[in-house]
Image (spheres, grey):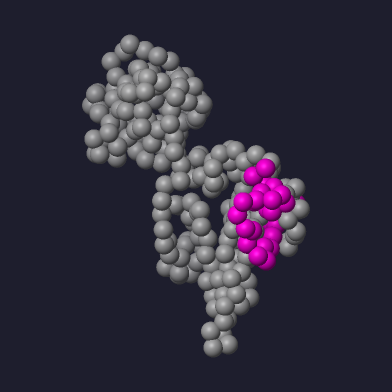
Amino acid sequence: MELVDRDAIRAVGPRLYERFRMARAGSILRPDYWWDQSLGIVERAWPLPKGLRYVLHRDEQGEPQGYLWYHVEEKWNDRQPDSTLVVDELLSCTDDAYARLWRFACEVDLVATVRAEDRSPDEALPWLLEDGRAVQQHHRSDFLWVRVLDPVAVLQARRYLAPGRVVIHVRDEAGYAGGRYALEADADGAAVCRRTRRSPDLALDVQALGAAYLGGVSFRTLAAAGLVAEERPGTLDGADAMFRSSVTPWCSTWF
């Protein structure tokens, strides 16, 4: 673990984030101006937190694998420290970096509470602690919207955890994505998708396709809500096995 300045984070942050983005469904691009604004290198419309500190994690070979930037809201009660450490950004490309960065945040002197926003819904932090109940989620809201415009391109762009075939009938009142699409994924996760006239296995609106696309919600859950119709019995389980994701989709970037 190394305490560094913001220039060091600016130098290595983009390539670390790109590694992270390619492994995490739901992550979006961060242009150069995002880094310059977020780190306060250029003028921004909202104030930068005071007293920002930066930490870089390196592996045993000295290669950066994650970083943390944070600030402390200092508070004392009856001469006892009651400060809050606010995690402004914690990003890791390995499990070891994740655990070590969180440990650093939790061991800063004179801090009673650690607060972090814009974190993943499947955060592993509780499982790192002797008492997982010390971690409490105070708020949860949607932070990612997917609107499919070209089902052929979209369905071929992602990878699938299980091989399979499914014909999806998409309804789109706006006229962009409507039609029937035959999707076939192989054992390596690659897929081919094309328009078809075959009878559909599943029928759904484009909003439901967007919800299921990243693997964060199952077709069976959407079917229970009346948003997906199983036109061929037994299709839901096979489609869910194809579309599920090994990680929960997460967008950590304001847009």
The front one of 42 and 21 is 42
Reply yes or no: does residue 46 show up in magenta: yes
The front one of 16 and 113 is 113
The front one of 77 and 160 is 77
Q: Residue furthest front?
A: 45
Q: Position of residue 144 (x, y in %)?
A: 46, 42
All told, the count of numbered labels is: 0
Residue 33 versus residue 74 in the image, above or below: above
Highlighted magenta segment, given as a residue range:
33-62
Q: Is residue 76 left or right of residue 63?
A: left
Query: Looking at the magenta stretch, what is its main secondary structure?
Result: loop
Q: Residue furthest bottom?
A: 78
The front one of 12 and 254 is 254
Q: Position of residue 62 (x, y in %)?
A: 76, 53
Residue 114 versus residue 217 in the image, above or below: below
Q: Position of residue 251 (x, y in %)?
A: 51, 44
- Quadrant of image for the N terminus: bottom right
Q: Position of residue 160 (x, y in %)?
A: 46, 31
Reply yes or no: does residue 22 show up in magenta: no
Residue 214 versus residue 58 in the image, above or below: above
Please name the residue shown 47% across and 62% down the image. Answer: 126
Q: Is residue 120 left or right of residue 54?
A: left
Q: Is residue 81 left or right of residue 236?
A: right
Please name the residue shown 50% across and 66% down the image. Answer: 129
